[in-house]
Amino acid sequence: DAGVTQSPTHLIKTRGQQVTLRCSPKSGHDTVSWYQQALGQGPQFIFQYYEEEERQRGNFPDRFSGHQFPNYSSELNVNALLLGDSALYLCASSDLGHSGGETQYFGPGTRLLVL
Amino acid sequence: DAKTTQPPSMDCAEGRAANLPCNHSTISGNEYVYWYRQIHSQGPQYIIHGLKNNETNEMASLIITEDRKSSTLILPHATLRDTAVYYCIVTHTNAGKSTFGDGTTLTVKP
């Protein structure tokens, strides 16, 4: 049973560029959430996708956007990158449609460095 | 989601039980208590969760007080590989998201 997978594992970008991160949920899961984790801090919720719609959003600017595909995989896009966007980006999947979705399973993350 | 309070750090001797406390005094009736841990630079790993009753699985036990205002995660025989940051989270049914605090850094020492 494949767990949550994310790509790429590491990424280096320069300020002002745009980046796309990808996530495949755990088999049987229909919901994907994205988190940003700065060094030394806990993960911060960015947004969640369910049935290809953004269901919830945390306190992040519109530069952060996402998409969910019919196969439940998801992308996180960040435009106009800032130095402060350097972080570990985590994807978590859950089964909102059947079990309430409280239990989230996390991927290994994508470490983004903005220079 | 209710706010949780955890000690910033704890030590535990290898082979002994690690007891990690969490306060969640504003928890409401339909909120679950969840525990995750994060080993350095990896994604958080789900450990266990509960609503009212104590729970046990192959990784840990969760003890929730009768008033549900606090809980304790117990790792019965800690190993060096249990060294990690442990997060206690309270979340609503159908919330689908988790609000993480700073967690407790558990260091298991030989």
Image (tube, coloured by chain):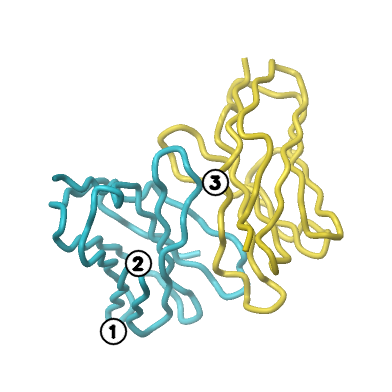
Write down which chain is painted cyan: B
Residue at label 2? B59
Q: Position of residue A35 (x, y in %)?
A: 59, 46
Of marks 2 and 3, the one in the foreground: 2
Q: Of B87 and B38, which appears nearest the observer?
A: B38
Q: Which amino acid does label 3 sit on?
A: Gln
Label 3: state its secondary structure. strand
Residue at label 1? B66
Identify the disc placed on residue A44.
3
Q: Rounded to the nearest whole Å, what is the CA distance between mark 2 and mark 3?
A: 25 Å
Q: Which amino acid does label 1 sit on?
A: Glu
Q: Residue at x 66, y 54 (%)?
A: A33
Q: Residue at x 43, y 72 (%)?
A: B49
Q: Residue at x 63, y 54 (%)?
A: A4
Q: Along the horizontal axis of the image, is A25 left or right of B41?
A: right
Q: Rounded to the nearest whole Å, what is the CA distance between mark 3 and mark 1?
A: 30 Å
Q: Where is residue A65 in the image (x, y as percent from the top left)?
A: 77, 42
Q: Rounded to the nearest whole Å, what is the CA distance between mark 1 and mark 2?
A: 23 Å
- Relative height, residue B12 to residue B60 (above, below): above
Q: Of B1 and B47, which appears nearest the observer?
A: B47
Give the image quarter of residue A87: top right
Q: What residue type is labelled 2?
A: Met
Label 1: state its secondary structure. loop
Write down which chain is painted yellow: A
- Relative height, residue B65 to residue B1 (above, below): below
